[in-house]
Image (cartoon, grey):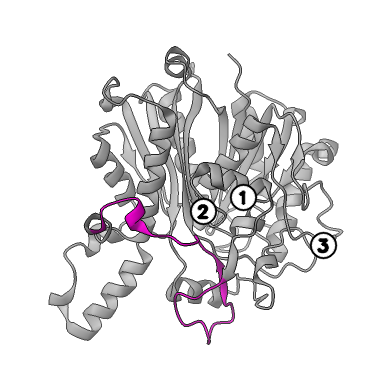
């Protein structure tokens, strides 16, 4: 089946290194760390006492406070970034067919905070104390629903949930919807708000987090030999996609083009990566095949790169298997070194970083790289941004349960 070309015309980001897409990008290329000590709750008994947090976030700057109280923070983040992406696209919403606008927005966990708060209410005061908004605030798909309701977008509306691959899965599915004619436009991405007591406790219990409490800002250090776990992050990333024909006809600014993706499973373990990387290799090869390109066409990969001892090695080895000698000619990076791991929002924010790297010809660094690991020996664009003309860039995102995604983006040319 012939496919339509799909381009990125709007972006929105709310991250630990910048509120709004321009600040996000500036934070990345300057090598800013978004990690700092947690002061919003008592962390005295936690092994990890820091997280990558959105600085000075005040929801009243973005929406009516009454409206905000009926949303978990992950949904607030999604609404804010969807607004930015729609506005950034320059679309005149009065001139498009809203039946043809899809909304695909996911969250890896959903309303984690509201679930905890309402569980406490139920335990202490009983059934009558549970809010009538509890379930609508909790469910991961509510962000897609809320965006649809706000704008009247009546196209395909859903939420793919695949842990830390969520954002990328939703972008890939949105690409499919447009490429195969089910929609002409799509708002897509991911949002997450896990930085509170239960969120931190859960990831500490599975021993996934760094405990570098003496230097939080350097705790996320992908590919560095002294890495000891990821940094919990929060935020959202959103894209507005549309057909090439629509964007060119209206003279839209086009950040880049999506040309393919690969989805796969490790079929190995609920949290640990497959050391042989079979699933990741499959996702990478599937993405290359879908894009109709060869490994030597790739200039840049924004890696999953979580800063975990096993994960960084497994991903590096998978890239070597697929790209061979060319792996050493690719500028790789992990923007998680700055943003922390934004879970269900990670793939979306990092896809935006990939598209902007292509658009600006500038690759953000992997910061905090100090001690080379002989098992991680590729070019990770360490500590300083690097200028490079990029034709094709990739983003990898993997999730607990063995979910793998690879998206392929291309420099836009008419």
Q: Name the front one of labels 1 and 2.
A: 1
- In this view, the residue in front, 250 or 371, is 250
Which numbered disc, 3 or 2, marks the residue that appears first in the sequence?
Answer: 2
SS for dot 2: strand
Whole-angstrom CA distance, mark 3 to mark 2, is 25 Å
Q: Earlier in the sequence, mark 1 or mark 2?
A: 2
> Rounded to the nearest whole Å, what is the CA distance between mark 1 and mark 3?
20 Å
Q: Is residue 158 above or below residue 271?
A: above
Residue 136 — which label? none
What element does badge 1 sit on?
Answer: helix
Q: Which residues are magenta?
A: 37-65
Q: Are marks 1 and 2 in contact (CB under 8 Å)?
A: yes
* Element on which disc 3 rests: loop
Residue that protrudes farthest toward the left in the picture: 128
Q: Quadrant of residue 52?
A: bottom right
Name the dominant secondary structure of the magenta segment. loop
Question: At 29% from the left edge and 31% from the top edge, which residue is drawn?
Answer: 155
**Residue indicated by mark 3:** 370
Q: Are marks 3 and 2 in contact (CB under 8 Å)?
A: no
Crowd rating for badge 1 (residues with CA inside 10 Å; few <14, some 14–19, many 20+)? many
| Residue 242 seen anywhere in this rendered image of the structure | yes
Viewer-closest of 49 and 39: 39
Q: Is mark 1 in CB contact (under 8 Å) with mark 3?
A: no
Residue 48 picture location, percent across and down: 58, 77
Check the picture and name the quadrant holding the C terminus.
Answer: top right
Decide which of tag 1 and tag 3 comes sooner along the chain. 1
Coordinates of residue 167 in the picture (x, y in percent)? 48, 46
Is 323 situated left or right of 286 in this image? Answer: right
Give residue 15's mark: 2
């Amino acid at each position: 089946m012939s496919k339509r070309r799909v381009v990125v015309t709007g972006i929105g980001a709310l991250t630990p290194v910048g509120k709004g897409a321009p600040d996000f990008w500036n934070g990345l290329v300057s090598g800013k760390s978004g990690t700092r000590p947690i002061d919003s709750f008592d962390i005295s008994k936690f092994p990890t006492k820091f997280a990558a947090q959105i600085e000075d976030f005040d929801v009243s700057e973005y929406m009516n406070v009454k409206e905000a109280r009926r949303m978990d923070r992950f949904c607030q983040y999604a609404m804010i970034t969807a607004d930015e992406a729609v506005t950034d696209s320059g679309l005149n919403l009065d001139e498009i067919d809203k039946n043809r606008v899809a909304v695909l927005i996911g969250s890896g966990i959903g309303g984690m905070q509201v679930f905890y708060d309402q569980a406490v209410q139920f335990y202490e005061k009983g059934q009558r104390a549970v809010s009538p908004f509890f379930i609508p605030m909790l469910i991961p798909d509510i962000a897609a629903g809320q965006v649809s309701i706000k704008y009247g977008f009546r196209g395909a509306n859903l939420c793919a949930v695949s842990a830390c691959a969520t954002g990328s899965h939703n972008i890939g599915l949105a690409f499919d919807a447009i490429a195969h004619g089910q929609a002409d436009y799509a708002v897509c991405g991911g949002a997450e708000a896990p930085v509170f007591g239960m969120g931190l406790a859960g990831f500490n219990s599975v021993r996934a987090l760094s405990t570098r409490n003496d230097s939080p800002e350097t705790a996320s250090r992908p590919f560095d030999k002294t890495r000891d776990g990821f940094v919990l992050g929060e935020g959202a990333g959103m894209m507005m996609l549309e057909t090439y024909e629509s964007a060119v006809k209206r003279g839209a600014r086009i950040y880049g083009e999506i040309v393919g993706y690969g989805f796969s499973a490790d079929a190995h373990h609920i949290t640990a990566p497959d050391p042989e990387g079979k699933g990741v290799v499959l996702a990478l090869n599937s993405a290359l095949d879908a894009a109709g390109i060869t490994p030597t066409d790739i200039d840049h990969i924004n890696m999953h790169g979580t800063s975990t001892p096993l994960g960084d090695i497994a991903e590096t080895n998978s890239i070597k298997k697929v790209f061979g000698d060319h792996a050493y000619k690719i500028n790789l990076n992990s923007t998680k070194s700055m943003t922390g791991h934004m879970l269900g929002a990670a793939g979306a924010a990092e896809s935006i970083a990939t598209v902007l790297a292509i658009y600006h010809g500038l690759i953000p660094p992997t910061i905090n790289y100090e001690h080379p690991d002989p098992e991680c020996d590729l070019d990770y664009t360490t500590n300083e941004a690097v200028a490079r003309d990029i034709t094709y860039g990739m983003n990898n995102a993997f999730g607990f349960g063995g979910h793998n995604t690879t998206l392929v983006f291309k420099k836009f040319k008419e």
